[in-house]
Amino acid sequence: MGTVTGYVTGINGNLANVSFDGAVHKNEVAYIIVDDARLKGEVIRINNGVASMQIYEMSNGVKVGDKVEFTGEMMSVELGPGLLTQVFDGLQNPLPELAEKCGFFLQRGVYLDPIPDREWDFTPCVKPGDHVQAGTPFGSVPEGLFKHQIMVPFTLRGDDWTVKSIKEAGSYHVRATICVIENSKGEEKELSMVFSQPVKQAVKCYDERLRPDEPLITKIRCIDAFLPVAKGGTFCVPGPFGAGKTVLQHMEAKNGEADIVIVAACGERAGEVVEILQEFPELEDPKTGRSLMERTIIICNTSSMPVAAREASCYTAVTLAEYFRQMGLDVLLLADSTSRWAQAMREMSGRLEEIPGEEAFPAYLESTIASFYERAGKVRLNDGRVASITIGGTVSPAGGNFDEPVTQATLKVVGAFHGLSRERSDARKYPAIHPMDSWSKYSGVVEMDRVEEARNYLRRGNEVNQMMKVIGEEGTSFEDYIIYQKGELLDAVYLQQNSFDPIDAACSPERQQEEFDVLFDALTQTYDLEEKTDIRAFFNQLRQEFLDWHGFEFKTPGYEEQKEKIKAFFMAKAVI
Amino acid sequence: MQKVYTKIETIVGNVVTVRANGVRLGDLALVGDSYATVIKLDKDIVSLQVFAGAQGVGTSETVKFLDRPMMVSFSDHLLGRIFDGAGVPRDKGPALTENMIPIGGPSFNPSKRIVPKNMIRTGIPMIDVFNTLVESQKLPIFSISGEPYNDLLARIALQAEVDVIVLGGMGLKYDDYLAFRDALEKGGAMSHTVMFVHTASDPIVECTLVPDLSLAVAEQFALAGKKVLVLLTDMTNFADAQKEMAITMEQVPSNRGYPGDLYSCLASRYEKAVAIEGAGSITILGVTTMPGDDVTHPVPDNTGYITEGQYYLKNGHIEPFGSLSRLKQNVNGKTRDDHRSLMDAMIRIYAQYKEALEKKSMGFFMTEWDEKLLKYGEMFESRLMDLSVNIPLEAALDLGWEILAECFEPNETGLKTSLIKERWPKKEAVE
């Protein structure tokens, strides 16, 4: 098969029209040759013998007649050992290496190998004659914390493949052939530790999908107890600017109990990525005692980088997540922000002169968002191991109004909704997740019926508060006033969490349960209090005691002592 | 060899088309004697955006392609000069042609950025004390039209401790431009200032070039090790110019007529703010006027998602609530040991003052504590918030302690006892 070539016939922004000879596929990758640079692009439409390409780079300097080379391959990522700890752009270019080569600025048309050029200690786990199929591990290499499994490419078709030969344990180059497989027709395939995988097709090398029923611990009380996220589930975090979306995601990336965390910074500030880059290598993963960076991959396509690559960055991230899921690991994918991705789609759709939908977003916005989130899930792999991908995406709605198309399309497909509110962030109540508007369909670390009862205090307390604004404190009954104080107490000592405090920042599930038990006990008591000043003083003191409790390390004598002190304090006023 | 074309096929808005071959996207051309850029190619039809507007352009006008993108000269000779949105001198000085650099260059590699650590002192307490401006930060001033935002910007330009100031004016009233120029000249800052000014009566296309010109120049100064402050006023005019151009080109509008790529347009400019390892930095302070004081309007809204905080200019002062410098934590821990605690305490009490004020206006009973708050609030507003106050950070902190001491007992402030012992002013004068 000879390479198909063509030439540019028109260009508008990052959309190029190309006339070609031969066969061209939709979504295949092509390069425009401008002077000595090769600009990567993807065919997104073919119309009357003209292929429309979106260019992933700045398109300045392209002229009519420039040569185009079609590769015949879909937009793909390279999968193999050495991906962890790296920082990639949306096209899987390693950014630090790019900086070494090109200096301070991102030079277009430079594509580097994402897989480090080195040798690994390979240990085979199959022998000649063994049956294999797409996704079957045939060996492993040690990579940091993990045994990185080397698998048969996910795109392998047919189930009659057997191992013909495999190298013995030893050190091999990452791209060296280490295994040969053949099928019944006598076709052979040489396998190395690396293979490429198209990003827009979900990897389905598993036995079955399971219901996400196990909570993914984030160590954020408000999420784990009240608005839980499940392993293999999806959640979204919409919020106006300044409400703390990114801080919340960083907390989740730090404390989320997953094996691998992939952060896709999609169209957001470069400064925030720099914070992760400088902070994560210093932080210790509490589970393993190693640097947090060892379980992290960052895909970074910041707002000033070419728009078309934003879309690619989400797909690149989810494909990497699927790769690690196939190894039997739990992966957490955090995308910040899916609105920017949707906007990139909108720009492209406009250039293609498609009929616009709501707010000029393309009509396929919903199905595209849905198919992205649907790549999350808990699965049983072919060899019986259970693994998962959890996807959390932030949404940046225009004007902080959740009625816009991207938020609404996202809400339809996610299992949990953590809506951030400007009101709460202005009042410095962090995390600013709105406890009443948000919801979750998963079960968390505390039994749901007790959570519901606790939430009821919040709801009624809020109603009383609204009423008090009109009639003043004087006109409120003692019963109502106590309910209001109980709601405030729950909010202040359980839902709010200080992410800058070394102890309070990460609250283990056991501690969350214990704290919830005590708090629930305090909320459900009837108190013998008569005067409003007494009620206020009592709850202020109780709140202070709880907050002090947050300052003690879990299960230390001070912690136990404070727990007893709190219990004694509120039981003294309780009516038994 | 430069070919000259003389057959313009269409003229719509500021866009003309001509049939030509071998033209590159983004190249510069001369239509008559006005500059234009190539914005679209379709077979041999080249669309050109004419900077000076297509008014009076005839179908037989000559079109000459210059075979290079839009560029600006960069050298130290720029300092003290004033140019318009096309890079043409506005100050009767000679045109500069040496060392031409392209504008709108590639973005900075995120892995080469460093976390900013230095504050930029402005002498304005509401900035220095409460929302510190940090080197390499990008911050807009959200303002209602009619607020003295340009005066504020001029004052910051005069007082900020930076090496180079680049001022990009978009849609400025001519009076405002003259006011800027006079203020900078009088203050002696002109010698390290470059101005790119588009006034309200200039062609609209030039308005969209101002940020790119300013930032391309700033980037070169920063790479040469200079601390650069870029002032952009007013970014809403820039967005409106983008809107106007998009609509005339028949692009589908997304929100209130603005083009779908408004976010990317703004982000690619603001993201030029950077601290470069081993070299200088670019700090961007922009003005975004909010039509109808509406922060959910597309321009301030998109800006808020891009920038690292914002200053709210309202009723002639920078509002302590709503204003936010996201990077202040990076610097205010090492200015003076009382900086953070004092900042928090003063804002907390000021919030209580606002509540007390509301209570008073509703005719509720005022307690002794409320009276204290009212006294504090007034002093805070007149002695710290007023924009004419010009004192260094340390003096502003001392003043903060004085105000607290005049209004409250030490234990009413919620400040740590150790700090109070060290900093609480002695009250012989009062007692």
Image (cartoon, coloured by chain):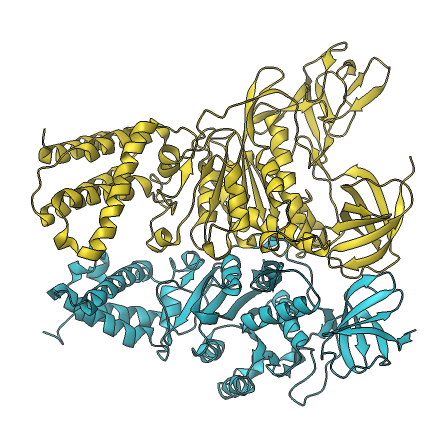
Task: Describe residue A14's horizontal placement relative to residue A258 as left or right.
Answer: right
Looking at the rendering, which quadrant does residue B89 occupy? bottom right
Residue A3 location in percent, x, y? 89, 40
Examine the rendering and report whether any part of residue A236 can be seen.
yes
Q: Which chain is assigned cyan? A: B
Please, is residue B121 above or below residue A10 in the view? below
Percent x, y for residue B255? 56, 60
Name of the residue lying farthest toward the top: A129
Question: Which residue shows up at 86% across the image and 59% down it?
Answer: A64
Q: Which residue is drawn at the image coordinates 33% and 73% (left, top)?
A: B385
| Image mark count | 0
Q: Residue at x 43, y 30 (%)?
A: A442
Q: Against A144, is B271 above or below?
A: below
- Looking at the image, residue A298 sits to the left or right of residue A159; the answer is left
Which is nearer the eye, B271 or A209? Answer: A209
The yellow-coloured chain is labelled A
Percent from the top left, x then y, of residue A178? 76, 21
Point 24% across, 74% down: residue = B379
Residue extending farthest bottom: B92
Position of residue A88 measured from the top left corner of the image (x, y, whole percent): 64, 44
Residue B167 quadrant:
bottom right
Which residue is at the front of the view, A77 or B262? B262
